[in-house]
Image (cartoon, rainbow, N blue to C red):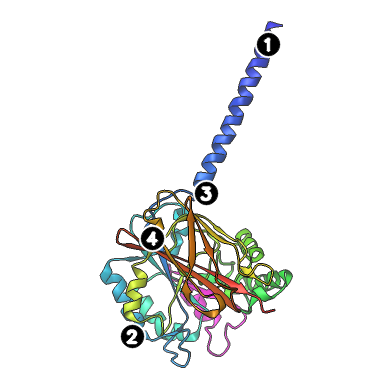
Amino acid sequence: MIIKKIFSLAASIISVLILVFFITINSKSDENNIKYYSKDEGILAIMYHRFNENKYPSTNIKMDIFKEHIKTIKQIGYNFYNPINFKKEFNIPRNQKMILLTIDDAFESFYSEAWPFLKKNKIPFILFVSTEPVGKKGYMTWDQIRELENEMFVFIGHHSHSHEYLIDKTNDEFIDDIMLANEQFINHLGYVPNLFSYPFGEYSEFMQKYISRNFDFAFGQHSGVIDKNKNKYELPRFPINENYGKIDRFKSIIKSYPLEYKKLFPLEKKLDKNNNPPLFKVEFFRDQNNLNDISCYSNEANSWHKSKIEITDGVLTINFRDKFSPRRGRINCSLNDNGKWRWFGTQFVIKKN
């Protein structure tokens, strides 16, 4: 009888210890899931498209301006980030900000104009390729893409097959498009890239979940700086073109720092008449300085204005003036944190009624 009680007591103790162990593991797992104020200096990603194609100013950058961008980055003392380190280093806070170059669409002008300069200087970058237009007029060929891919500092990313407005497609059509691209990448490169870029920076909750199950990281087109707390499947980038690439503005962009947060709501970035305007909330870390000094701007009804915000217990809520108009709604928030300008942005896609 005594022996039974001893065994019973021992079993109870073991059960408690196992329970404590799993609670601890889960707690550590949550901590490791990039959710603590890290003071990460960040990775600032910049997005380019065309080079010296002056008839497309909304997606073009002139080469002399691009070279000035690179010169400015070096003069300030920032290093270029090599994407090979993403997977092993993403959850490690950086003590020095780095710059990541990304190029979308694989236009031929990138190959003829910018590639020789980047190759000469061995500057790392990601080239996001949509497979359907490869080899067509104005786009790179697979031979040219393979030439780049052979360099250790060049990384090919997945940018869908068709580069259409995939958020307007059915879920099955979206998946089919990704699968078509996968087949092309395997046929021509021998593998499917593990980095993804949403065409036009547009994605729904379903799209993001699908991408998260099939890729390691994904980039949007909303502004901000990457830190270890950012969602790996909606990483921000600053789009650069002729209008937004002037050197004074560029200098202010690359001096931005991450504005870290725990959670951002809603998860669904596709809006319709039932959820427009959205209930928008951001939960910040209590360690964030000067949170009451944050300013946000949003473009409801296609008009940019300072947003009406409320901050309660570290949670920021925006009370929108009106609905967002098709096609995109944007929110940008910034904060002067003892001389460092911290920034994050969000983009919604609005379905036409």
Location of residue 81 with respect to 12 vertically, above or below: below
Q: Secondary structure at mark 4?
A: helix
Which-is-in-front pick, marks 2 and 4? 4
Q: Which residues are magenta?
A: 126-154
Which residue is label 1 attached to?
A: 5
Which residue is label 4 attached to?
A: 293
Which-is-in-front pick, marks 1 and 4? 4
Which residue is label 2 attached to?
A: 64
User: Residue 224, how many percent across, how many down?
Assistant: 44, 66
Q: Amino acid at mark 4?
A: Asp
Q: Are marks 1 and 2 in contact (CB under 8 Å)?
A: no
**Mark 4 to mark 3 CA distance (whole Å):** 28 Å
Q: Amino acid at mark 2?
A: Asp
* Of residues 150 and 312, the one drawn nearer to the viewer in this rendering: 312
**Mark 1 to mark 4 CA distance (whole Å):** 62 Å
Q: Quadrant of the N terminus?
A: top right
